Amino acid sequence: MRDFSRIQPIIRKLKSIIILTHRNSDLDAICSASALRSLLLKMNPNLSVAIGTPEGVNKVCEKILSNFEVRYDPNPTMEGIDMVFTVDTNNFQQLGTLASTLENLKAPIIMVDHHYPHPSMKRFTKIGFCDDKSTSTCEIVCQFYKRMRIKLRKRDAELLLVGILFETRHLRLATSRTLLTVVDLIKQGVKVEDLYPILEFPMDDSERMARLRSAQRARILRSNGSVIVTSEVGSHQASAARALITLGADLAAVGSEDGNQLKLSLRSTREFYRKHRIHLGRDLAKPLGDFLNGTGGGHSLAAGVNGSGKLEDALRKLTNMIKDQIERPQLSQKSS
């Protein structure tokens, strides 16, 4: 990953920057955006830095951000902007109605993300600070502070840790580097025990029912020693996919069909990735998104797809893609 300090001479010359999250922002996006805003202001105190959240933030964000003072604009304007940062945004379509505006914007676009970058982002961004080995975008922003030897304010350290805890499912998906980052944040005066109550809230009935229905409608496929499960629910696809992994799936794909619009969430275990080296974002979500005339991306253990068509066709295509990639090593061994 590039050294963030290299752009400091440019930042010092600017007057106005906007940091954009993906639409319906989650905690990793908004927490990393807020801490990045503070860092940019340290680099240039005369800057005007706004946070834009196309279509607002999700319900989890609304509940948790009430404990912090984070200002964001769900309808940001691009007028007079000298530079744009996108955080936790894998492709241009995730920016909603702002996507077409940015495509024609003359201001440089800087990408900060922990997902495997989609070609649509590479095409329009001037510089990318991307690291798909990081478990969250908050972790990347922490590294910016550390490498520039800038001390975090306690509030920003708390926000970054909240984002990391949320994105890693309370450190279940953490790596050794993630844990070292958490230690650095604790050294800034953050108390983990004070943040866990903020992140704990009961699952609502709609999410609970989506999880149960996904199990009830599950289609199970065994291939080369792995259990692949597909299902369909009307909402909470990501939560339902995680639940199927907890029940025993090695890879779970849960989708919804609303008119002609499709949405799918993919999840897999670390063991599945180690065994088959299938990166969900790069090897499955991206090509499936192209097949559905939409977009897809993510990282090794979690990914998402949006597109159009029939869900049954999409799941069939996905299942065939998985089988091809799982069974290819066996076929090559047999042929040799």
Image: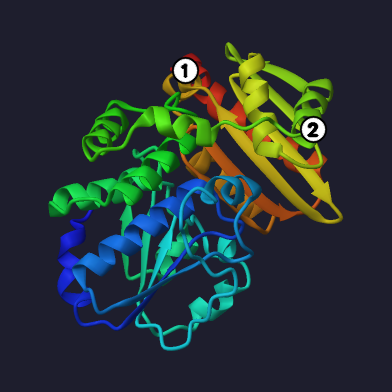
Quarter of the image that includes the C terminus: top left
Please determine whether, in this image, residue 323 is positioned above or below residue 189.
above
Residue 133 lies, in percent from the top left, at: 34, 38
Residue 15 lies, in percent from the top left, at: 30, 83
Please determine whether, in this image, residue 199 is positioned above or below residue 17.
above
Q: CA distance from mark 2 to mark 1?
A: 31 Å
Q: Is residue 288 visible in the rendered structure shown here? A: no
Q: Nearer the viewer, residue 43 or 305?
A: 43
Which residue is denoted by mark 1 in the rendering? Answer: 271
Q: Nearer the viewer, residue 141 or 248?
A: 141
Q: Of helix, strand and loop, which one carries label 2?
A: helix
Q: Could you classify mark 1 by the number of other residues whose Cα lies within 10 Å: few (under 14), some (14-19), or many (20 or more)?
A: few
Please determine whether, in this image, residue 47 is positioned above or below residue 252.
below
Q: For the residue marked with disc 2, what is the amino acid?
A: Asp
Q: For the residue marked with disc 1, what is the amino acid?
A: Glu
Which residue is denoted by mark 2 in the rendering? Answer: 205
Q: Nearer the viewer, residue 9 or 36?
A: 36
Residue 303 lies, in percent from the top left, at: 56, 41
Residue 167 lies, in percent from the top left, at: 47, 38
